[in-house]
Amino acid sequence: MKIRRQSQGPLSKGDQIEVKRPNGAYYAATVLRPPSAMRKNMVFVEYHAEDGSKCVRGYVDLTHVRPSPPLELNRRFRIGDAVEAYWENGWHQGVVRDLLKDSKYVVGFNGNEGKVEEKSEIHQCNLRLHREWDDGSWVPSMAELANSSNENDDKPRNVKLKIVFRKKQADAEFQKGDEVEITSDEEGFKGSWYNAVIVEYRGNDKYLVEYSTSRKEDGVPLRAEAKAQHIRPCPPELLPVASFCLREVVDAWYNDGWWIGVISRVLDGSKYAVYFSLPDEELEFDHSKLRIHQDWKNGKWIIASEENSRHLVMNSNRLLHKMDVDEKRFWVKFPKGMRVEVKSDEPGYEGSWYSAIIVDSLGNDKYLVEYLTLKTEDLGAYLREEAYASYIRPRPQHARCTRHYKLFENVDAWYNDGWWIGQVIKVLATWKYAVYFQTTNEVMEFEHNDLRLHQEWINGKWIVPSKDTI
């Protein structure tokens, strides 16, 4: 179920940009969600972490975002040039201090404010002139850079200008040192993925890998040969979710690997029963041992949809019978006209709930709902959407609190037409509170009347979860 909102600003989904991190370096990023009406000054992006081990997704302030600078092939640099050097997946600002042989330069870093300057040898292909993105244009401009290049009078000591192309082994999709996940066709291991590191490419779409969690009897990490079709990159890190839903596809950490399963029952105490079709069994897991399932398809990570969940569920008559019994016992049927709340799973809006009315039942656990606070893009009518029953719950009862909220108490905060799960981290004067939101890593202030007690709808009952579950 997606809540559609009109995007604002010049950025579009899929744009390639650069993001400034706290260390001052810029990192290549991809826009996953442009600024919206709710987050006018924020953009949701994906970029590589500083160590390159994994992809990170999250919101970034627009003041820390810029387009990628135009390419300048074969530029020569002078002593004193302000440059940006590429290493550890990011562009770090420095100054050229000396010119060496073989198209290499000595670059100084972090020499401001009385700090000792660190120097490093950097190849020409990993350098570019430092430029500022100011009011929609690059400073200095390309014309100014061209003029400065013609005036280059420095005499480098035996500098050879050469273009360097990275040499890759034929057909090698992964490189030495890449962190990956490995699966197997072996009986008893189908549907599971194990963390590993690429040791070398052996040709014919085969790699030697070293497992991160599996060891031989003498304690040495296990190495084995794996086919390319059984290897994928490690999934990108997603923002944590407050809870998983019935029939949601998840990965469960079990026996040193990630196993694909389906939530078959939501239990008390942040626990879940997870069904595995291979083998045909059901096990219980803590929330911390589960992650959102993502599929690696055509070189991209895709979050599992509700349709994927239903396909996996259909693999077992035993589970269907079990879930059918559970649903007859616990599942709420939502009649027409019933006031409910509908959950969003859109990136950046996970865990938020919006008031709605049931318009009609569409069968197959689907309903047509009309939101009470969200309107269509032309603002001409209230937004209507189809939603699975697992994304719908009744309105909470007795949620308003007449006493002061306590420090670290879990609450729902009314913000931008919806209820957002948070935690009180500071009790202020005059019935005000500072609330922390884990999904966005933000703190905001709220009046007492804009908060309510946080409750979870589990097995047909409203339950107040412990502090540790948010």
Image: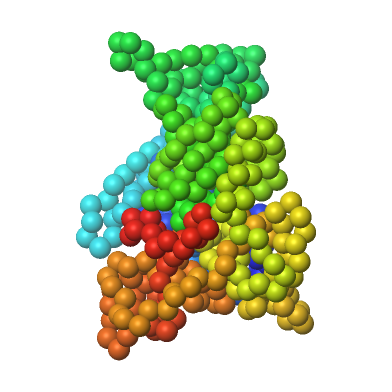
For residue 434, which quarter of the picture? Answer: bottom left
Where is the N terminus found, in terms of image quarters? bottom right
Residue at image coords 56%, 32%: 276
Query: Looking at the picture, does residue 18 appear above or below residue 37?
Result: above
Would you say 363 lies left or right of 197 here? Answer: right
For residue 437, which quarter of the picture? Answer: bottom left
Image location of residue 451, percent across then percent down: 42, 77
**Residue at far top of view:** 218
Image location of residue 182, percent across then percent down: 53, 25
Query: Looking at the picture, does residue 337 appear above or below residue 82?
Result: below
Image location of residue 379, percent across then percent down: 73, 81
Where is the C terminus found, in terms of image quarters? bottom left
For residue 309, which quarter of the picture? Answer: top right
Tell which of 123 and 171 is nearer to you.
171
Image location of residue 252, percent across then percent down: 48, 37
Q: Is residue 430 visible?
A: yes
Residue at image coords 31%, 54%: 110
Residue at image coords 34%, 58%: 466
